[in-house]
Image: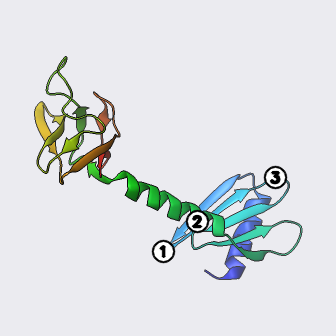
Amino acid sequence: MELEKVVALIQAVSDSALTGFILEEGNLRLELQKVSGSGVQVVEKSGISFSNTEEEAEPVLVKKEIEDEKEEQKESEQKGTPVCSPLVGTFYRAPSEGEAPFVQVGDRVTKGQILGIIEAMKLMNEIESEQDGVVSAILVENGEIVEYGQELFLIR
């Protein structure tokens, strides 16, 4: 995106009643947010930041955001591999009410072991571990509605 277009967007947001604006174009994502005073801050995911105050817009490298993204990625890798829901339905941790859950955090699991059940259209679908490991997190509550692709467990 050309610098002139970015500056024009900054000015438009600054002059409007908007408090924020996000533009996604191809692999570029620009996020504009009003900051205290009359300025607008623009953060580009590639790590370039522009600020528009009374002075000219001047690019500044934003390292903190890039470091935060790397830290989040590192934390997720340390916590484990997600087991995601293959369908939409109601998640259950135990085979029936009053029984012990299939797994708890810290339990060692083997590939193919049942981790939970998702009920969809009165059918019970078993959720199995895709790898050997240890359950490092259970990300949904018993009886919670889950979406397709939603992370249910983390296995490390």
- Amino acid type assigned to the residue bearing label 3 in the image: Ser
In the depicted structure, whether residue 10 falls above or below residue 123: below
- Amino acid type assigned to the residue bearing label 2 in the image: Glu
Q: Quadrant of the N terminus?
A: bottom right
Earlier along the polypeptide chain: callout 2 or callout 3?
3
Residue at horizontal 31%, vertical 37%? 105
Indicate the quadrant where residue 100 lies.
Answer: top left
Q: Which residue is mark 2?
A: 67
Drawn side of residue 112 relative to residue 145, left or right? left
Give the camera-side residue of 67 and 61: 67
Residue at horizontal 84%, vertical 65%? 53
Give the camera-side residue of 5 and 135: 135
Badge 2, how many Cα within 10 Å: few under 14, some, many 20+?
Answer: few
In the depicted structure, whether residue 92 falls above or below residue 62: above
Q: Which residue is mark 1?
A: 27
Drawn side of residue 6 relative to residue 73, left or right? right
Mark 2–mark 1 Cα distance, whole angstroms, equals: 19 Å
Mark 2–mark 3 Cα distance, whole angstroms, equals: 24 Å
Mark 3–mark 1 Cα distance, whole angstroms, equals: 29 Å
> Circle 1 sits in a helix, a strand or a loop, which is it?
loop
Q: Which residue is mark 3?
A: 36
Earlier along the polypeptide chain: callout 3 or callout 1?
1
Q: Name the residue furthest right.
A: 54
Label at residue 106: none
Residue at horizontal 15%, vertical 45%? 128
